[in-house]
Image (cartoon, rainbow, N blue to C red):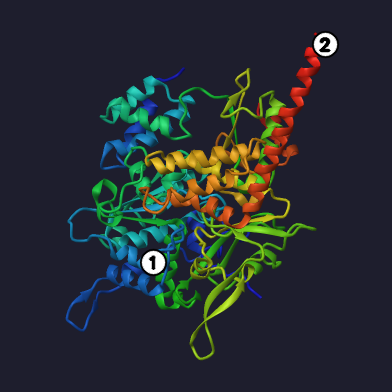
Amino acid sequence: MSFQATPELEAEVNELITHYPVKRAASLMVLHAIQEKFGWISSEAVQWTAKKLELQPINVFEILTFYPMLRQEPQGKYAIKVCRTLSCALGGAYELHHHFCEKLGLDAHKHGAQTTKDGKFTVEFVECLASCGTAPVMMVGDKFYEGVSHKKADEIVAGCK
Amino acid sequence: MAQEYKLILKHADEPGYTPDIECYLRHGGYDALKKALAIQPKDLADGKKLSGAEQIREDVKVSGLRGRGGAGFSCGLKWSFVDRKSGKPIYLICNADESEPGTFKDRQIMHKDPHQLIEGMIISCFANDVKLAYIYIRGEMPEGAKILNRAIKEAHAKNFLGKNILGTGYDLEIYVHRGAGAYICGEETGLIESLEGKRPYPRIKPPYFPAILGLWMCPTIVNNVETLCNVKHIVAMGGAEFAKLGTPNNTGTRIVSLSGHVKRPGYYEIEVGKATLRELLYDKNFGGGLLDGRQLKAIIPGGSSSKVLKAGEKFKLKKKDAEGKEILVETDMLDLPYDFDSLAQAGTMSGSSAIIVMDDSVDIVKALANLSEFYAHESCGQCTPCREGSLWMNKTLQRLTHGEGRASDADYLGKIADNIPGGRTICAFGEACSWPVQSFLAKFKDEFVAKGAADEARRAKEIEAPAEHKQLESAQH
């Protein structure tokens, strides 16, 4: 399902709106809430958000297209984000990314996020995740992993059921 | 020998220390807040009264606290710019959008000792008559956001937040606002736009100084996580006592994020200026030295935007001699005290206090290409020199690292980098993306030229080789 305004979502969004004297300010948090529930933000979700916050859809859409974390299409069940910025690169982030791609049958040289055919994994490079002392670091969904060796990477993948 | 000095991270890594409020209270938590709220108005010689809030603001000035986010601007001065006569509400935003590559100190505070930040924020809000505050945390830190939300809830339950805090009549709400993966949101006016629910395009100053026209065009204070934590300690120990920590004009402690090619990467809290770069890299208390058999090549001393320092570089550092006269002392880059002013004298900055160490295994062109890719990705696109320049620099560096370089690329890169900063862009991102390129080129130009020249020579050979191949083909036909 791409989007449905459930009572649960309504309640969460209504609460979020109370955090700000101006409704528009809630838009980023509302989009986070939607993405958490549906995995991505569809145009129906944009329309709904705009209406809820008394905005034009373009006001919501321009946020959706700007922020790298917000998605306009579904991703794999497990989203693997490997940090690629300098300290992690010095610590082997490119090799780690390559390892994931090879293991999951993806093209390590392709730019941007890639999803496996079965829709289980999405692998992408992201910019600095702010844990440079434990490079290389990565996330799977909301879970954060530090000092990821190739062996640890294999265990992480194996743990994704 | 330089030692760690744990003020902010005093408890964070102690065994058994947990992020919940009961643990924080057992360690003297919220005592500084109680002290702050109880400060009595002080009579001045001219008959005027100084309120408790005003006294805290004065004390923060006395402490000499400088912002821990990157610019190192005086916190007391920043607070003094706030327009208190407009009649509009004053907002405070905690900048927890920690995303300067190399930096991972705020993460430690928020994950391990969130109440310290909350207490620092409440005191700072009280001192500035703020009734509504936000923590703008990186989208990539969902766990941190959860921990902070829990901490806020706990603080509410104890009436450290909410209405009529501890019976003083003071009201305050703090909300967590999550970013969504854009580095530019760390720039304070970009952050404000983002919080307002727009694209985080930085605002032009003047007129949009946050202290006057900030969030919803109201006076707004934006402070880094570590800065706000320091306010708690300033109230607890007094500004004058705080100023004794560190070195003159570089007071207090700083959490240094150390990453790259050292044996013990990690975060180390030091008194500002009481450890040199050499000590931070080589002492067993800190980095523990380079990896075996390696030589130092370069360090980036204050987050990825700061200008690189080359191993063996010497600087003339201003010092006072025995009679108090100012003299210039030649100082090796490794002997620079790690503080705001010494690094500035060396033409770089301590920025977000993040040191990235690179040994002689590093391909310096590749390292810069990595950073340029970051800046090309993160430019918000508002100002042409930055949007185009960051992309051109990245493209040029990518071709240099993918066998398509030219010997002239070094000069070309320099020309682009020189045409982005210096008032041509709205915010300091223009500087941030140019400084690495300018400094890498200034100090390692030969490596860029050599790489480009080698690519050209190789391509010239490749053009000759297929020609022979073609002759062979036509002969066969």
Q: Identify which residue is drawn at 64% across, 47% down.
A: B449
Q: Which of the pair B257/B328 is nearer the observer?
A: B328
- Residue drawn at x 46%, y 42% is B389
Mark 1 lies on residue: B74
Give, as a three-letter code, the residue at label 2.
Gln
Q: Quadrant of the C terminus of chain B?
A: top right
Point out the residue furthest to the bottom here: B323
Disc nearest the viewer among 2 and 1: 2
- Left or right: residue A108 versus residue B257 is right
**Residue B354, horizontal then vertical, whole percent:** 56, 57
Tell me the tag on residue B111. none
Judging from the image, mark 1 belongs to the subunit labelled: B
Residue B342 in the image: above or below residue A86:
below
- Quickly name the residue at label 2: B476
Q: 10 Å neighbourhood of mark 1: few (<14), some, or many (≥20)?
A: some
Seen as rendered, the residue at the extreme right is: B476
Q: Nearer the viewer, residue B113 or B210?
A: B210
SS under mark 1: loop
At which x and y percent is residue B308?
58, 57
Q: Position of residue B267 (x, y in %)?
A: 60, 59
* Corner quadrant of residue B42: bottom left
Left or right of B397 on screen, residue B222: left
Precedes in sequence: disc 2 or disc 1? 1
Question: Which quarter shows the N terminus of chain B?
Answer: bottom right
Quick check: can you spot residue A135?
no
Q: Disc 2 is attached to a residue of which chain?
A: B
* SS for callout 2: helix
* In this view, B389 is above or below B70: above
Compared to B461, does B431 lie above or below?
Answer: below
| Image location (x, y in percent) of residue B307 | 54, 57
| Residue B314 visible (yes or no) | yes
